[in-house]
Amino acid sequence: RLALPLLSANPLSSVAYAPDEIILTLAVAGLAAMHLAPWVGVAVAVIMFVIILSYRESVKAYPSGGGDYEIAKTNIGPRAGVIVAAALLVDFVLTVAVSMSSAAHYVIAMFPGLAGSQGLIAGCGVVILTLLNLRGRAKNRLLATLPVVLFVTALLALIIVGSIRAATGTLAHVASADFEIVPEANLESGLTGFLGVLVVLRAFSTGAAAMTGIEGPISNVQALKPPRARNAGIILLLLGVTAAVLSIGLMFLARAANIQVAEDPHENLRLNGGEIPANYVQDPVLGQLAHAVFGLKSPLFYVLGVLTILVLITAGHMAFRSFPNLASLLAHDGYLPRQLRRRGDRLGYSNGIFALGLAALLLVIVFQAHLTSLIQLYVVGVFVSFTLSQLGMLRHWGRKARHTADKHIRLRIARSRVLNLVGLVITAMVLFIVLLTRLTLGAWLAIAAIGILYLIMHSIHAHYEQVERELKIENVQNSRTLPSRVHALILVSSIRKPVLRAVAFARASRPSRLEALVVDVESEATERTLKAWDALELPVPIRVLASPYRETTAPITDYIRSIRARYPRDLVVVYIPEYVVGHWWEQLVHNQTALRIKTRLHFEPGVVVASVPWQLQSSRELIAQYDAAAEDSAENIVSQGSAETTKESHGS
Amino acid sequence: RLALPLLSANPLSSVAYAPDEIILTLAVAGLAAMHLAPWVGVAVAVIMFVIILSYRESVKAYPSGGGDYEIAKTNIGPRAGVIVAAALLVDFVLTVAVSMSSAAHYVIAMFPGLAGSQGLIAGCGVVILTLLNLRGRAKNRLLATLPVVLFVTALLALIIVGSIRAATGTLAHVASADFEIVPEANLESGLTGFLGVLVVLRAFSTGAAAMTGIEGPISNVQALKPPRARNAGIILLLLGVTAAVLSIGLMFLARAANIQVAEDPHENLRLNGGEIPANYVQDPVLGQLAHAVFGLKSPLFYVLGVLTILVLITAGHMAFRSFPNLASLLAHDGYLPRQLRRRGDRLGYSNGIFALGLAALLLVIVFQAHLTSLIQLYVVGVFVSFTLSQLGMLRHWGRKARHTADKHIRLRIARSRVLNLVGLVITAMVLFIVLLTRLTLGAWLAIAAIGILYLIMHSIHAHYEQVERELKIENVQNSRTLPSRVHALILVSSIRKPVLRAVAFARASRPSRLEALVVDVESEATERTLKAWDALELPVPIRVLASPYRETTAPITDYIRSIRARYPRDLVVVYIPEYVVGHWWEQLVHNQTALRIKTRLHFEPGVVVASVPWQLQSSRELIAQYDAAAEDSAENIVSQGSAETTKESHGS
Ligand SMILES: [K+]
Ligand SMILES: [K+]
Ligand SMILES: [K+]
Ligand SMILES: [K+]
Ligand SMILES: [K+]
Ligand SMILES: [K+]
């Protein structure tokens, strides 16, 4: 039950900024155009509802949690799947950037003294969110869901009280109600002609920001209780109704309160024909509505502001949480490094979360947390995946229809196809309009980011494919033949316990031939080593390798190559004594030569490198810590319940 | 023959800044004190000559190139040796910082428009010098020695022509000759009383900057042609004579030309009782002398300026070059990481050179390339090592005297002892005065840096000692016992060629027991693996390790621990198939799990980790490149001659 509010945080948080974008886009055509704002809101809500209904079909067909990525991959092809995945990754980054920028807007609405620091506040928000997610502690779910529930309750109260006040004419008078809008030069005659249509289309496509996040529930089906597909359907329906009611209600209320917002208020708004006050800070529509309904500077305004900020933070947090899920799917299919397959891989995900946070931070800094610009990118990312997902579902139903004779089922399929077709046309249109009207204003950045991510994932996949071909076993019989004999070599530098252990282990494996090697870098040291070796009276001969250039690695590889040349079918095993240390700085003062030799020997075919570790005392404390930490994290995983552990059983 | 100019660059470059420091220190006591400047110069030159004579004795006694470090270590003790080494490291950093700051001063003298950017110019100089040394190309020695030779020639010409002009009264009139000096409030009566004595002592100790670098030749004896000790002695004598002649000549000439410099010219200098021109840029003494002798704005002024800058760059470069030599000695004695023993270790030295450059850059930035401040630190660093070295030599002769009966030899020893005693008293005095008068003005920084370096080197040494005790072989008989049997385990993730190779190699080593292991992180994948394994029809059983927490490492270590518990005297060998790749990014998408398992297994006692490498095609190109590079560098070392290769045969 707690999943509903958490998964709804992202889509519902959009009402914090989508109304502003619709109104200020229309504002360029003057007051007359403003009257259209609620109807654009209605159009957005209707389309959102259609897409949500279509997603209900999707989740029934693909209940495994693969989301838009799986739908596009299965029905269109792997390339489309990777494009969707790239778009979703961009979407995660922008969810964080937009949510924190909007949160900063609300912070300033509550503390107008901070006006002008929107970029700084949003940047700090991104950094804190990233650090919280890097620490990766399990959050108290109840604590996270409470703000979402209270937020929806507060907005419903706002709409109900506001409607009554609007009907009785007792809405408070907000500052912006007195302003006049200066339309752009070529739009002074209002929404007439082609330009007028374009403005309405742009308002609609920008308002599509309200739909960002509705793809979340179907990607996170696995977090729900079974029956998952059914629960996801219910969540989507509830979400659709709530989002539609809120969007439409708030838009009409904003019109009733005559709230005006513009992209640059000091440029585009006028007060009694003159400039508006220099210290005027343009609050978000939701904030101005709270003033109008609950009274100017009412405490309820601050309550709503805090709740909105908390919901925006939850939305950003969920984007971070969605990343490992998608990354795991992509890693499964070989589009990201294999180690990301397992969600337990802390290190891998830390890098991913760090990259996500850094990208969001860069966007916030570059755009100075300017929402109108960021939302263009956001809409591009989201609608690329929407469009491909709708196309995928259309094909899915097409294939289904071809294989079904049952009339009843064919009718239901036909209904789904219509839904998806409408969804496809509209999502493609939104994408087209955003690209058409905003490409040079930043939307190209989203396209470029999707392209780069696509290329990276494509390259990783191509690499894995090539390695797969290279490593495939063609001739089992052939590869079952064994090397005839084993030549064991022990690398000796100084005669101490680790070398003795290496000798003992090498001898225990009873090789056909066993030799100790010492590289004569320094004649005095070599003398000492030989003397000490003789004193040990070991039944192992020692060979001195000349090193005219005082080099350690080359004489060893040269010697091994000479053995391999004489006995090409033999196996060479090189035993290297190694120190195991407990602190990173100890690593700096030990093993450096051993490490270099090991790395180099890996490149020689037919050579096995056998590390004989010697655990220094300091390493024992470290391993005790490791063991304790492993137990802790095991307990942690168990306490997180079954949702987590079943996450990976799907896919191939 | 080319070594003389190169080794002389550092000590001779001191005449670029030492005269300024002597004059401006005396300037605080007014014009009367200024007349003492040449005599302070004479005192510095005499002491320098004494120290150089003493160094000639040192190099005969310690011809191996260990320098002050070896002298202090052998005669006083290892702690004194490490203090000297720390002081020398600080000395290297300051040679770079001071040389580049002085070079910046000369750049500004030639292009007065750059006045005020001394810090920036010096900083760029340090960065460029560091980058050049990081690339580590062998420089054309002839090209590097030419500026030093021309610099000395030019200065001798300046002194001769200048002396003639001074005698005939035809020296040009430099701007600063008209200025009056405003003595400090408490020194208005000139150099009387205790304060006056203190000023003279301070001028002398600051002028000791002229002696910085004379320790270079005895640390670099190995770079000379044999007979090395004799050649070093000749070089030191030539150096001493040249440096003394230049110092004394320039100081007298500066007095004759009435050149005045002050720490803050706009504060401490007056023109006809009023302020000096606001745009007055104070040139270094050498620059003003060139104006006075060769005529104002003579082309020879620019020639001398360029030569001075080149010599200062060579001095800084030699400090970088001296670092590996000292680091190698320290690594030999276990005070720095062992891998620095060999000068061939590029990576190790790159880190050292980077650290050296970074420290110099920080100093230049913090002190804004302000020479008077930097030189205090410089003198501290140099004189700590001078003092301890003199003390060491005194002890050395004392011990010699006790073991010699021959009257003739005893007489020569007595002479050396007197030289060293004079040297010790004077170097200790200089150190004392600098610390006394400048401790709070920055000299503490040099002391702190020496202290920190001492602690680091001491810790490294203590760590090595402890490891040595831990690893010493006490009971040969005991450690000669062999493990009774070998349990071989093969880690299997997917059935591809690398696994087959690992199986073949493991079988070839004929262990007592051989098992393949697969960790059941994902049941489907495990099924596939088991099926593929059966299809191979290998005579090796496969064991599935349960992984309730979807963890790879813990089930393996748990299983190994259970084997070790049952058969404590057996050896466990874990064969891990590993991919060898050719590009760094390939490493990111392969082996991450193998690497983690290997690292973890190193902590388990009684376990050998045998990496079975599989060379991917991309790795073959890389190894071909390696082989080519190795041949190149071998040729390079040979062409550098014998000096390089014999460098490490000394010391234990
Ligand atoms: K959203
Ligand atoms: K989203
Ligand atoms: K999402
Ligand atoms: K110097
Ligand atoms: K020096
Ligand atoms: K030096």
Image: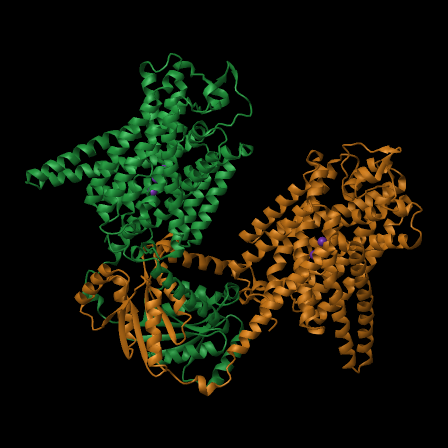
Chain colours: A green, B orange
Observer-nearest residue: A200 or B178? A200
Q: Is residue A375 above or below residue B120?
A: above
Residue extending furthest front? Answer: A168
Q: Is residue B528 above or below residue B121?
A: below
Observer-nearest residue: A409 or B424? A409
Ligand 3 location (quadrant): top left
Is any part of residue A69 visible from this angle? no
| Residue B49: % across, % down | 80, 60
- Tell me if A477 is positioned left or right of B550 in this view: left
| Residue B382: % across, % down | 72, 59
| Residue A44: % across, % down | 30, 29
- Tell me if A365 is positioned left or right of B273 in this view: left
- Tell me if A159 is positioned left or right of B451 in this view: left
Observer-nearest residue: A246 or B452? A246
Q: How many marks?
A: 0
The residue at the point 21 percent across, 41 percent down is A58
The residue at the point 74 percent across, 52 percent down is B375
Is any part of residue A357 visible from this angle? yes
Observer-nearest residue: B174 or B474? B474
Q: Is residue A229 above or below residue A242?
A: below
| Residue B639: % across, % down | 53, 59
- Tell me if B339 is positioned left or right of B595 in this view: right
Q: Quadrant of residue B607?
A: bottom left
Residue extending furthest bottom? Answer: B477
